[in-house]
């Protein structure tokens, strides 16, 4: 614990930020977060923290990245960590895959040109991933020109979501009902009254309507 | 008296009733239904007077209270006949109040937990420094049905206008219109069944406004509402002046 | 420190996995990462690590979440961390939202009409807020008329309120007896899913699987 100039508060502050964010912490960003004019020397604090991590045999350290710093695990556990991440984190569907899957789920059986018309982008790569993962399968061919393949979701897909049939997926009406509401809608008499006083009449009708 | 009631923050009609019960130190198992109903309706009237949009649920509860009140009268009429076997019509209300109170308390407990833990943020790692090779077996592990719905919704929202399969109709309705509507029925016949009145109403909003209009007309003594025993339906009757 | 049975290697291993991931580390996930034969008691290791974090005044600790564990920052730095990760929009939940969550947590899986029966008010707005904040999710459909969607609380719900399991939910004992007759215990989505997978579901599921 070489450097006695670094207060425990500063160390905790920097550590908390490093733990809670996946973006490297830079001196500028650090400064923005501290409001009261208090100054923290990021590089020195990091140095002190790293020394402590080493002494206490932690499995992580603070690595410089560009102008900033981030917490990473030590080399020794690289393999086990990579294995773990691949299994539990990386196997998540990408958003493109998720969206394609959703479109197929709702509109099955559906051909690639139709999927692409809805999504507005080419879907070849995503479709092969979904096929590979057995979330969708080919059910036949469309009668449309070119007789494109038709895709449907698999039984595995339905079972995972506890659905008996694709018809059990939430309907557009239900989607609308869920999504057309923000927390900003008046919910209590207090809010209603405030709104009334502010003379914004419209919101109420909407609330009623969706009720 | 009633004007002293504050427009407090009530989460709904059950919450409002619970407020009356706490305020008057009422035994929840022996609710003086006439008094509570009166307080409740006064509150509703005040809301209408203040031009507050009355949520349909408040009207539903008013109906429930009136139904209980009516049922409490029935055994007295048939007194002597199996009086003990008649279930207290207040039971359902008591159950609802107790249940609601229970969840209200838990909500309060959750709030305490929230203030204790909401300031704790989870670890957010950056995986850019780890090479990865995808393993397919667990692909759905973090996807919920809501994610699927959401993704579909996003895709639909991005679609060009003409392809969008649905749009929301904005309906307009006000109490005065519905009062006219009710009167138009009463002109044809002095007694109208509620079910007849609302048969043609397709929208929940218009239905609610119609019920509010009915309450309003009751308050102003234009009409009288007669309750049938089952309360499946009720009859609206025009009142004569001075009736 | 207290428990000498826990080797430094085990502690480092668990720490490395916790630092590298944003999904809770469960005993099963841990087991997958360890070579045959070697056993690590996750709960005990976590306890030991937490003790060290406390002694060494770290700005984070390991929180039990469902069946697993996750690293979170300590309360003390809430404002700074919130500033940094730009989560000021994530204000505290409204009272209506907390109350709705209470109902869902105790009666899950539960449909919107059932929630509204208990609360006595329309819950669309609140439900969409809770869904957006990932505190609840859709778990399927009810068999009741209209086949309404069913809602359950999520792992994020447990994390947000610092609950290890749904059984840790606060309860008021006297009133608890109200629901004692045959009311099911709170279940997690995971448990529901397992149940579903074990084919306890009704004929429909099996029928579908074969179809």
Image (tube, coloured by chain):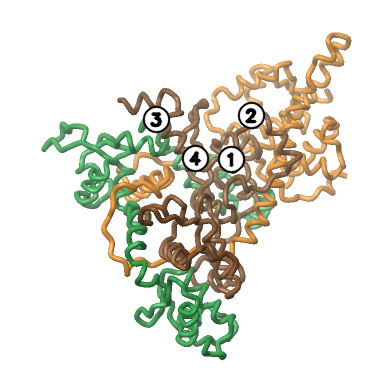
Chain colours: A green, B orange, C brown
Q: Give the label, 3 or 4, closer to the camera.
A: 4
Q: Are marks 1 and 3 on the same chain?
A: no
> What is the distance, in whole Å, between disc 2 and disc 4 at their CAs?
18 Å
Q: Are marks 2 and 4 on the same chain?
A: yes
Residue highlighted by disc 3: A164
Residue, x 78% and y 29% (percent of image)?
B221
Residue highlighted by disc 1: C186
Left or right, A111 with respect to B60, comes to left
> What is the distance, in whole Å, between disc 1 and disc 3 at their CAs?
23 Å
Residue highlighted by disc 4: C191
> What is the distance, in whole Å, between disc 1 and disc 4 at their CAs?
10 Å
Residue C34 % position (x, y): 38, 56
Mark 2 and 4 residues: CB-CB less than 8 Å, in contact?
no
Residue B18 % position (x, y): 77, 41
Residue A173 % position (x, y): 44, 37
Q: Residues within 10 Å of mark 4 (few under 14, many from 20)?
A: few
Q: Secondary structure at mark 3?
A: loop
Left or right, B26 with respect to A15, comes to right
Q: Are marks 3 and 4 on the same chain?
A: no
- Compared to A205, does A34 lie above or below? below
Q: Residues within 10 Å of mark 3 (few under 14, many from 20)?
A: many
| Quarter in which the C terminus of chain C is drawn | top left
Return the disc, 2 or 4, that comes first in the chain's sequence.
2
């Amino acid at each position: 614990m070489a450097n006695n100039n670094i207060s425990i508060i500063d160390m905790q502050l920097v550590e908390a930020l490093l733990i809670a964010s996946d973006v490297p912490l830079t001196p500028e960003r650090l400064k923005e977060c501290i409001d009261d004019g208090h100054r923290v020397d990021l590089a020195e604090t990091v140095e002190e923290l790293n020394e402590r991590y080493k002494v206490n045999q932690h499995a992580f350290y603070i690595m410089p990245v560009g102008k900033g710093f981030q917490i990473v695990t030590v080399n020794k556990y690289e393999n086990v960590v990579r294995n773990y991440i691949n299994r539990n984190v990386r196997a998540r569907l990408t958003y493109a895959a998720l969206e394609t899957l959703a479109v197929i789920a709702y509109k099955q059986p559906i051909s690639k040109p139709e999927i692409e018309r809805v999504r507005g982008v080419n879907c070849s790569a995503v479709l092969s991933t979904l096929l590979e993962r057995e979330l969708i399968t080919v059910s036949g061919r469309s009668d449309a020109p070119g007789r494109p393949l038709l895709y449907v979701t698999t039984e595995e897909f339905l079972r995972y979501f506890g659905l008996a049939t694709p018809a059990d997926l939430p309907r557009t009406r239900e989607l609308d009902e869920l999504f057309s509401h923000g927390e900003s809608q008046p919910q209590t008499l207090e809010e209603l009254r405030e709104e009334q006083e502010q003379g914004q009449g419209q919101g109420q009708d909407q609330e009623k309507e969706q009720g | 008296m009633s004007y002293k009631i504050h427009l407090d923050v009530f989460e709904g009609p059950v919450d409002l009733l619970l407020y009356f019960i706490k305020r008057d130190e009422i035994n929840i198992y022996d609710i003086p239904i006439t008094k509570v109903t009166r307080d409740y309706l006064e509150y509703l009237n005040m809301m209408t007077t203040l031009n507050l949009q009355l949520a349909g649920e408040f009207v539903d509860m008013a109906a429930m209270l009136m139904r209980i009140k009516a049922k409490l009268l029935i055994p007295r009429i048939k007194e002597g006949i199996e009086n003990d076997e008649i279930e207290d019509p207040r039971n359902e209300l008591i159950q609802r109040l107790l249940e609601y109170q229970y969840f209200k308390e838990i909500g309060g407990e959750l709030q305490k937990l929230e203030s204790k833990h909401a300031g704790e943020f989870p670890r957010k790692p950056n995986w850019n420094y780890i090479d990865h090779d995808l393993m397919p077996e667990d692909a759905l592990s973090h996807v919920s049905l809501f994610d699927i719905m959401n993704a579909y919704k996003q895709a639909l929202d991005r679609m060009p206008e003409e392809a969008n399969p649905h749009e929301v109709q904005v309906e307009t309705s006000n109490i005065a219109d519905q009062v006219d509507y009710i009167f138009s029925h009463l002109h044809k016949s002095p007694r109208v069944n509620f079910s007849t009145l609302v048969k043609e109403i397709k929208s929940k909003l218009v239905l609610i406004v119609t019920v509010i209009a009915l309450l309003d007309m009751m308050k102003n003594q234009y009409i009288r509402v007669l309750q049938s025993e089952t309360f499946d339906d009720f009859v609206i009757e025009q009142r004569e002046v001075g009736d």
